[in-house]
Amino acid sequence: MAKVTVRAEPYEYEFDPATTALLVIDMQRDFVEPGGFGEMLGNDVSPLRRAIAPTKRVLETARRLGIQVIHTREGHRPDLTDLPPTKKARGKLKTGIGDPGPMGRVLVRGERGHDIVPELAPAPGEPVVDKPGKGSFYATDLELILRERGIRSLLVTGVTTEVCVHTTVREANDRGFECLVLEDCVASYFPEFQEAAIKMIKAQGGIFGWVAGSEALLKALEGVRTTTR
Ligand code: C5J
């Protein structure tokens, strides 16, 4: 398969769709809907919701072209045996991780709040990686899945930019994966963190990866018919 070139920063990003995965990080109700963990932390969730529509367009294109799609979800076992007490205590919340909230137990697997939002719901056959931490590689089988599928490049979307997206991109970069972060498909509760987090990725010659808007990616994929792995 011919390489695709995206207009990106700090310079063009080249990838082969056959060895690329679209990573959709933690687009869960608990982060992007009112009544979830994000709101319990005192945040307004509306900036995060702005990432849904562009991510949906990228997701649909990836599916049409046969690009591997992988979703992640941050959360914990119902018995909370994978929840460090330090994480539970953080923020001194009245209702925190594991406690009953408006969308079920907060950040607990199997609960409504832990689900991925319906707009971006995983399609049959798309791996969903459950992670107890901020990074998508820590204590998960994501790396094994990527290596088994021969994936070398990652198109990165999801929330939040400065937390789970950044941690994941740093982990991926250290493992030799080339990451393109889609600026309008990642979001933060804080505009200043969004701006700084994006700048950090592409600074110093792309120290952690590349950044582009989703339109630039979709334009670059216009001529591509289908992906053969
Ligand atoms: C946070 C995440 N922000 N998915 N999680 O706690 O970024």
Image: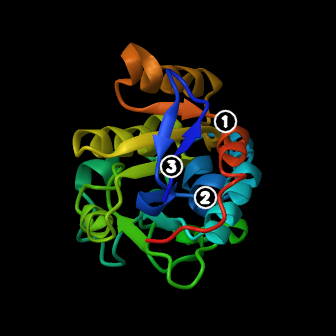
Q: Earlier in the sequence, mark 3 or mark 1?
A: 3
Q: Residue at x 52, y 29 (%)?
A: 12
Q: From mark 2 to mark 1, how far is it between C-alphas?
A: 28 Å
Q: Position of residue 80 (x, y in %)?
A: 30, 71
Q: Is residue 114 visible?
A: yes
Q: Earlier in the sequence, mark 2 or mark 3?
A: 2
Q: Residue at x 39, y 69 (%)?
A: 129
Give the amino acid at mark 1. Answer: Gly
Q: From mark 2 to mark 3, how far is it between C-alphas?
A: 26 Å
Q: Residue at x 73, y 67 (%)?
A: 119
In front: label 2 or label 1: 1
The residue that disc 3 covers is: 155
Give the amino acid at mark 2. Answer: Gly
Q: Earlier in the sequence, mark 2 or mark 1?
A: 2
* Secondary structure beneath label 1: loop
The residue that disc 2 covers is: 36
Q: From mark 3 to mark 1, how far is it between C-alphas?
A: 11 Å
Give the amino acid at mark 3. Answer: Leu
**Ligand 1 near label 2 (Cβ, under 8 Å)?**
no
In screen coordinates, is 153 left or right of 224? left
Q: Is residue 102 visible?
A: no
Q: Residues within 10 Å of mark 3 (few under 14, many from 20)?
A: many
The residue that disc 1 covers is: 213
